[in-house]
Image (cartoon, helix red, strand yellow):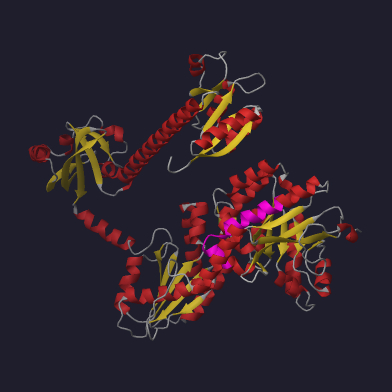
């Protein structure tokens, strides 16, 4: 095989030698194995429920799960997993095994048979998955087509041999019917007066014979109450449910339609979702004015909220944000929902509104507001680009483009930022995502990769001391990387580049593996195991396979997950909220802890605390520094609120980065009894700190 195939394999057997034999045989044929084995029914059930599996190899023996039990487990998990029975004697007849639910079998002493059966079942499994995927796509396409027909505003129907087989809601409304069933016994010719029926039949015949659409024909329709109205009828041959039929589109051309069109024109001025003006109306107003100022406003968390909560939540967010913006505008100011997560505001030259002052008020209002969507409370921020036209000859799109560029500059600086567009003297090519890698980044990437491949990495441990219980041993783990001069450097010097180019996930995993190895060594020495805090980056947060990898680590090491706490920076948890929330759920189920570090630096930290409920929070170092200043009462109040909220939620609070006596005194008065920092203990190469010295 040119490319090794990875098999997620569960072997239900108690014979370690036979399991090793199967693994060696498959690996010898080029397969890579993610192997799980068990001889217990509940353990096998858990593996089937929670791990991705391609095959199950099952030995039939006393005290092992039966074929019927395993087949039931697969059915209850709603999985498609082939079950292959291991045959090593003449007791079990192959035909009987297939009748009882096995997909296949192989003789243990026949390696070629094993490989052939595995190939066959994997091939069949892949075929079934492709067929299922195709069926799903076809069904989704049909659902989308049906939804389109049901929601279009044109009156549309399908006719087969003169009888309605389908009519959309617009068609029913046009002819005055409430239900589709009312049309079941009504032929199309009965929906026009007798004098127009020959013309209708002629149109239908021409369409069928020519096999193409016929230009609109003006006829007269008859509503259910007998009222007639002039109409334009279009028809085209088509198929529905594999049956030939004719598609009918009818448009009302009565004088009342003129008033209706005017009403629709008025509706086009307003965006249905936000309640602000539409993009079209904004551009028309700017085309007339071509003066004044433009604000281009981007909701910074729009994509994350849409991904996490769906389109219904996004529409509610847009409506609430639009309502806030409306209250800040003068009567002649025009605000529109311009694009996904974007509002555009046009301030005419005669507007009393000062653009920058308005931008500042909007940023402050959005940031201070608490949005409640689907029973969940959260905050967001916005970035605003401002462009002042000042009698410019530019067209509206150019004006908006300038404001957009200013908004992008503001976005790169962070939330609640405002940038005024200034025309550049010389246009320069900007390198962004996908642009050339700088020489500095290339050097860092090379150093990181070299460290990973040559094991030029090490760990340092800093104790987290409890002033309540000397039996509680905890360490924060720091990853160090050797530079070109063979001097250890903190990973923080490289983490920005590593995250940007997707390398930090591998470093996270290396740190976790080495930390667990250190715990195993302590276990072998008979030392009571501490809890280790390991920080993971946003690369790991967005890695869909991270939790399955972590679960396997604990299974292989046989360590209890309670000895590991994954530490996530508050900024990363905020930016990747949904991924962090899912990780918290999985860690809780596994038994691992979670900590939010650099915590307390945001205005909505308290809401993030309630939404995630981590096991620990590590207070932001800048907050601790401010607490050391006796006159900073606002910081003291923030600390009191956070620590009290954490205690109410049974969350342990860690003061990190404590390096001076004033800092220690500041946190002590708030009941924070877990402390990490050089004031207590410095980092060391081994987790061998004597916590008993702080007893009592």
Residue 613 in view here: no
**Of residues 663 and 249, the one drawn nearer to the viewer in this rendering:** 663
Residue 54: x, y in percent?
51, 35
**Residue found at x 61% / y 30%:** 19
Q: For residue 338, which quarter of the picture?
A: bottom left
* Residue 336 location (% of width, % of height): 40, 67
Quadrant position of the C terminus in the picture: bottom right
Is residue 450 rendered to the left or right of residue 477? left
Residue at left 61%, top 28%? 18
Q: Is residue 226 above or below residue 388?
A: above
Residue 509 lies in the magenta-colored region: yes
Position of 174 relative to 483 (above/below): above
User: Magenta includes 298?
Assistant: no
Image x and y of residue 302, in percent? 49, 61
Q: Which residues are magenta?
A: 496-516
Residue 629 x %, y %: 78, 77
Splitting the image into 4 quarters, where does residue 684 fall?
A: bottom right
The residue under the point 56% across, 68% down is 444
């Amino acid at each position: 095989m040119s490319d090794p195939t990875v098999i997620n394999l569960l072997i239900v057997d108690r014979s370690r030698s036979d399991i090793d034999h199967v693994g060696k045989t498959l690996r010898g044929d080029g397969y890579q194995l993610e192997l799980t084995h068990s001889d217990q029914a509940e353990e096998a059930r858990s593996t089937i429920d929670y791990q991705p599996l391609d095959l199950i190899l099952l030995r039939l023996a006393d005290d092992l799960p039966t074929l019927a039990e395993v087949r039931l487990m697969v059915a209850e998990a709603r999985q498609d997993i082939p079950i292959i029975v291991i045959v090593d004697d003449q007791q079990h007849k192959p035909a009987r095994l297939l009748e009882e639910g096995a997909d296949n079998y192989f003789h243990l002493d026949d390696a070629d048979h094993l490989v052939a059966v595995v190939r066959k079942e994997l091939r069949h499994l892949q075929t079934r998955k492709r067929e299922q995927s195709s069926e799903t796509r076809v069904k989704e396409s049909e659902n989308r087509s049906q939804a389109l027909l049901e929601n279009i505003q044109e009156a549309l129907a399908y006719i087969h041999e003169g009888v309605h087989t389908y009519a959309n809601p617009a068609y029913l409304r046009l002819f005055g019917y409430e239900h589709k069933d009312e049309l079941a016994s009504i032929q199309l010719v009965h929906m026009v007066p007798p004098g127009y029926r020959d013309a209708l039949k002629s149109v239908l015949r021409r369409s069928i014979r020519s096999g193409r659409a016929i230009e609109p024909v003006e006829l007269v329709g008859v509503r259910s109450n007998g009222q007639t109205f002039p109409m334009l009828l279009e028809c085209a041959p088509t198929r529905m449910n594999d049956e030939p039929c004719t598609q009918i589109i009818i448009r009302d051309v009565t004088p009342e339609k003129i008033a209706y069109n005017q009403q629709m024109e008025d509706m086009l001025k307003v965006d249905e979702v936000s309640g602000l003006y539409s993009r079209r109306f904004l551009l028309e107003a700017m085309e007339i004015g071509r003066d004044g100022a433009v604000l281009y406003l981007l909701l910074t968390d729009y994509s994350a909220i849409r991904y996490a909560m769906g389109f219904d939540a996004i529409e509610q967010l847009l409506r609430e944000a639009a309502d806030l913006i409306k209250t800040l505008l003068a009567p002649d100011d025009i605000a529109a929902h311009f694009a996904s997560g974007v509002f555009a505001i046009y301030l005419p030259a005669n507007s009393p509104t000062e653009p920058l002052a308005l931008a500042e008020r909007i940023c402050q209002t959005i940031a201070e507001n608490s949005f409640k969507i689907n029973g969940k409370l959260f905050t967001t921020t916005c970035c605003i680009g401002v462009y002042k036209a000042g009698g410019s000859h530019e067209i509206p799109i150019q004006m908006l483009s300038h404001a957009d560029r200013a908004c992008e500059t503001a976005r790169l600086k962070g939330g609640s930022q405002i940038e005024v567009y200034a025309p550049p003297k010389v246009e320069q090519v900007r390198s962004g995502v996908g642009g050339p890698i700088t020489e500095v980044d290339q050097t860092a990437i090379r150093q990181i990769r070299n460290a990973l491949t040559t094991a030029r990495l090490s760990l340092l441990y800093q104790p987290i001391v409890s002033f309540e219980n000397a039996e509680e041993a905890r360490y924060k783990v720091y990853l160090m990387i050797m530079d070109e001069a063979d001097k250890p450097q903190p990973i923080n010097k490289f983490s920005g580049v590593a995250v940007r180019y997707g390398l930090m996930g591998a470093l996270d995993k290396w740190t976790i593996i080495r930390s667990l190895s250190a715990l195993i060594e302590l276990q072998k020495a008979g030392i009571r195991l501490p809890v280790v805090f390991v920080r993971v980056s946003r690369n790991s947060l967005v890695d869909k396979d991270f939790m399955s990898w972590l679960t396997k680590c604990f299974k292989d090491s046989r360590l209890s997950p309670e000895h590991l706490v994954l530490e996530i920076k508050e900024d990363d948890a905020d930016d990747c909220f949904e991924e962090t929330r899912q990780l918290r759920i999985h860690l809780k189920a596994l038994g691992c802890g979670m900590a939010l570090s650099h915590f307390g630096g945001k205005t909505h930290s308290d809401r993030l605390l309630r939404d995630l409920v981590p096991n620990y929070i590590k207070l932001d170092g800048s907050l601790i520094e401010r607490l050391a200043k006796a006159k900073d009462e606002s910081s003291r109040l923030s600390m009191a609120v956070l620590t009290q909220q954490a205690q109410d939620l049974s969350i342990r609070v860690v003061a990190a980065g404590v390096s001076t006596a004033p800092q220690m005194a500041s946190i002590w008065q708030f009941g924070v009894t877990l402390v990490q920092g050089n004031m207590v203990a410095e980092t060391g190469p081994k987790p061998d700190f004597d916590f008993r010295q702080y007893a009592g």
